[in-house]
Image (tube, rainbow, N blue to C red):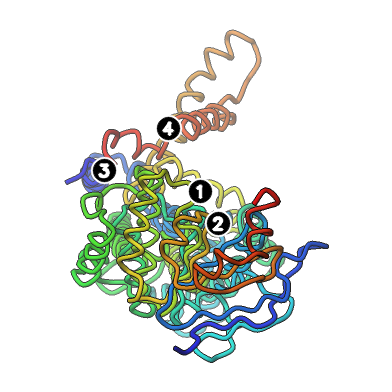
Amino acid sequence: MAALLEIKGLNKSFGGIKATDDLTLSVETGELHAVIGPNGAGKTTLISQLCGLQRPDSGTVLFKGGDITLVPPHRRARLGMTRSYQITSLIMEMSVIDNIALAVQAREGHSFRFVAPARGDRQLRDRAMDLLRRVGLEEKAEMRTVALSHGEHRHMEIAIALASEADLMLLDEPMAGLGAEETRAMVDLLNGIKRQHTILLIEHDMDAVFALADRISVLVYGHIIATGTPEEIRGNEAVQHAYLGEEA
Amino acid sequence: MTRKSLITLVVMALLAILPPVFYWTGNAFYLDLATRLTILAIAAVSLNLILGYGGMISFGHAAYLGLGAYAVGIPAFHWLYDGIGDWATNGLIHIGIAVAVSAIFALITGAICLRTRGVYFIMITMAFAQMVYYLIVSIEHYGGDDGLVIDTRSELPLLNLDNPLHLFGLAYVSLVVAMLLVNMIVNSRFGMVLQAAKGNNERTVTLGFNTYLYRLTAYVISGAMAGYAGALLGNFTTFISPEMMDWRASGELMFMVILGGATTIGGPVLGAAAFILLEEVLVDTLGWLESPLHSLLGTEVELSNFWHLPFGLLLIVIVLYVRGGLMGLLGRGED
């Protein structure tokens, strides 16, 4: 397998705090690679740098072999990278299907099209409806996004990530704030889409990570201390110490 | 049909029928009032494209009204005093200049303004508008702050703008076209991106849209439409002055949009109508109260000068308590 995403020696500081510290990581085509780490380990800073919202102080990010370290966010999306948000980031005033259709629209290049009504566009609507079906939200299509539950919002995030048909999906804590049952539903959903997509999963929920990941990297204070299969990580002493704390 | 579209249709039907009826029954004044209302409604509809649908709170939209009006006034001025060719009274050329100058002004200022957000955006749009205001004030040749009389109205094929009915008809048809245009734009793919960027810019950017360019495009379209309205306004007033593009005039346009209901096609028209009619009614009512007050107090009080006071209070109440403006109030109960 070839590396789809390669991060080499990434550094990012905020004042005196090193949020990312000489971070090196590679994600291979087709795998579901999870990054775990305790609170404040720099997971969200990492994902912000990967999608271009924050600029690293030093280091490089290679995507499909090309250097994208300084490429602006909307261009990264064009290159085939998509992200979901830890804190739900949807367009609340728009309907559920409008949110998804917008993501489908983004896939089809520029949208400087002023004449034909977008909501009457069968191509957009049908594709959006397919995606909603895949995440089990087809019955809520016409509802206003703000009216849906948190768990449903998380599913919408996945549908949007799928809509982009991106080569790499960055999923930022898709289980955040979900109850036990909702988490199970999300694990099932992700199990259904893995293999068809390369996924970098940033996640807090250990059970979910161990159930889903092909490989796991452990992030502590901005640095990757170990990478391996779930079994390897489970048995890694440094990880147990750093991640599970002294009581482990 | 939704209740909001029904209200819009009713308002547009009344606006089409009532003014000519007033005119034919000897109340020409009301036709004038309706023409002013209709022209300002075009500007309000154009502002709504960026303010309502785009979330760009521009506090400088009256600048385009002024630019459009001077695009009529300045060629007419040179035609009269310098004897330049008759092309200088051609309405199509006036409108062409008005739209082009406004679009270019919007492109240049928008490119800068749209790098800012929130309060900064409001302030910088206002600053650019004031810049144009002071520019016109400083050009003595065109009357400076005394303004400029337009001696001849634009000449258009088939129409005679000296005929108030023709001028009203042109303004009315232009308003309808403006509304259809904005409706088409906001429902297009472009419009979806524009509204998404208003709701959640970061998400829209990470989806792959360069929202800056989408916003700028909307800003230019909106400015060009308002410039067109300015050309009509110049023909209507036949007197242009920097007053037209004062920040207060920009504020009035904003009020029309918010009062009527932003993010609806008919809202700004309803707002412009309410604004103009209310102004008229308040001035009349207060003027009517002057003589009893005179006999009561023994001194002359020019009460009608204070019409802004009750007007302002009304606006505050509507903005505070009626979500979605008048359109939201009348079209209640539906999404």
Of B142 and A213, the residue lying toward us: A213
Count of numbered tags: 4
Per the image, the residue denoted by label 4 is: B322
Chain letter of disc 1? B
- Mark 2 or 3 closer to N-term? 3
Q: Are marks 2 and 1 in contact (CB under 8 Å)?
A: yes
Per the image, the residue denoted by label 2 is: B58
Can you tell which of label 2 and label 4 is closer to the viewer? Answer: 4
Chain letter of disc 2? B
Name which residue type carries label 2: Ser
Chain letter of disc 4? B
Name which residue type carries label 1: Met
Q: Quadrant of residue A125?
A: bottom left
Per the image, the residue denoted by label 3 is: B4
The percent position of residue A197, horizontal first and vertical second, equals: 37, 76
**Which residue sits furthest top?**
B296
Of B285 and A197, the residue lying toward us: A197
SS at badge 2 = loop
- Is the same chain shared between marks 2 and 1? yes
**Label 4 neighbour load within 10 Å: few <14, some 14-19, many 20+:** some
The percent position of residue A55, horizontal first and vertical second, equals: 67, 74
- Is the same chain shared between marks 2 and 3? yes
- Mark 2 or 4 closer to N-term? 2
The percent position of residue A1, horizontal first and vertical second, equals: 44, 88
Per the image, the residue denoted by label 1 is: B254
In space, the residues marked 4 and 1 are separated at their CA atoms by 16 Å
- Is the same chain shared between marks 2 and 4? yes
> What residue appears at the point 23 percent right and 39 percent down from the top-left corner?
B25
